[in-house]
Amino acid sequence: EAGVAQSPRYKIIEKRQSVAFWCNPISGHATLYWYQQILGQGPKLLIQFQNNGVVDDSQLPKDRFSAERLKGVDSTLKIQPAKLEDSAVYLCASSLGGGLAGGGDTQYFGPGTRLTVL
Amino acid sequence: KNEVEQSPQNLTAQEGEFITINCSYSVGISALHWLQQHPGGGIVSLFMLSSGKKKHGRLIATINIQEKHSSLHITASHPRDSAVYICAVFYGGSQGNLIFGKGTKLSVKP
């Protein structure tokens, strides 16, 4: 079974430029997550989709970050314009459903995209 | 104060040693994940547990819901176990998400 795919793996841009990341979740997974992991910290959830609808985007800096999952499969995360503090690894994860009652839902992570903003 | 605390932050061990990584959390949860992240790599889910104990190869994970504490043990550690181990708790209802600890960086020397 193919895992979660992300591209690009690495990206270097200058501040104020724009950048986009792509994620292809595991086939059949309804839920897709984007996380930001700054060096030395645990991942922080940016946005969670259930099919093509947004479940939680409370920690997404909406003035510069946007994400979409138009057909409920692939997703893109965009930063426009980028700031120095956006340098991080952006992780995409997917899971089968919205979470089993009382049990959680195993998330499968992609390899991440390492963004460096100069 | 972080809702998920891991200890130690860094751990260096000799090959063959028994290793324990601890995770304490302050929120009510329905499940807890232990994840492994290699340098430059993605995150791999090791365990998801909501009670008791799970074992997979040389890895053992335990959780005490009443004490809000979980431990990850590695028996007969090996240099290839060197990685960051992250504890994440799953909270909320059917649409909940994960709160992550900052991770424990493990280095196993040959």
Image: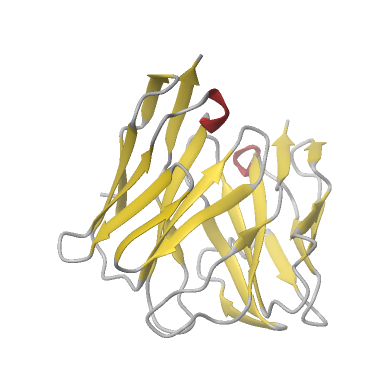
Quick one: A11 or A18, which is closer to the camera?
A11
Residue A29 x/y as whole percent? 70, 76
Q: How many marks?
A: 0
Q: What sort of colour scheme is used for the picture?
A: secondary structure
Q: Is residue A60 above or below residue A41?
A: below
Quick one: B13 or A117, which is closer to the camera?
B13
Q: Is residue B76 left or right of residue B21?
A: right
Q: Residue at x 37, y 72 (%)?
A: B91
Can residue A41 be seen here? The reply is no
Q: Is residue A50 above or below residue B14?
A: below
Residue A16 x/y as whole percent? 76, 44
Residue at the far top in the pictured view: B110
Q: Is residue A70 above or below residue B89?
A: below
Can residue A101 be seen here? The reply is yes
Quick one: A97 or B27, which is closer to the camera?
A97
- Could you say which quadrant of the image residue A39 lies in? top right
Q: Residue at x 46, y 84 (%)?
A: B94
Quick one: B78 or B91, which is closer to the camera?
B78
Q: Residue at x 51, y 73 (%)?
A: A105
Q: Is residue A51 above or below residue B66?
A: below
Residue at the far left in the pictured view: B67
Residue A107 x/y as whole percent? 58, 65
Residue A57 x/y as whole percent? 56, 71
Q: Is residue B41 left or right of residue A10?
A: left
- Could you say which quadrant of the image residue B90 lies in? bottom left
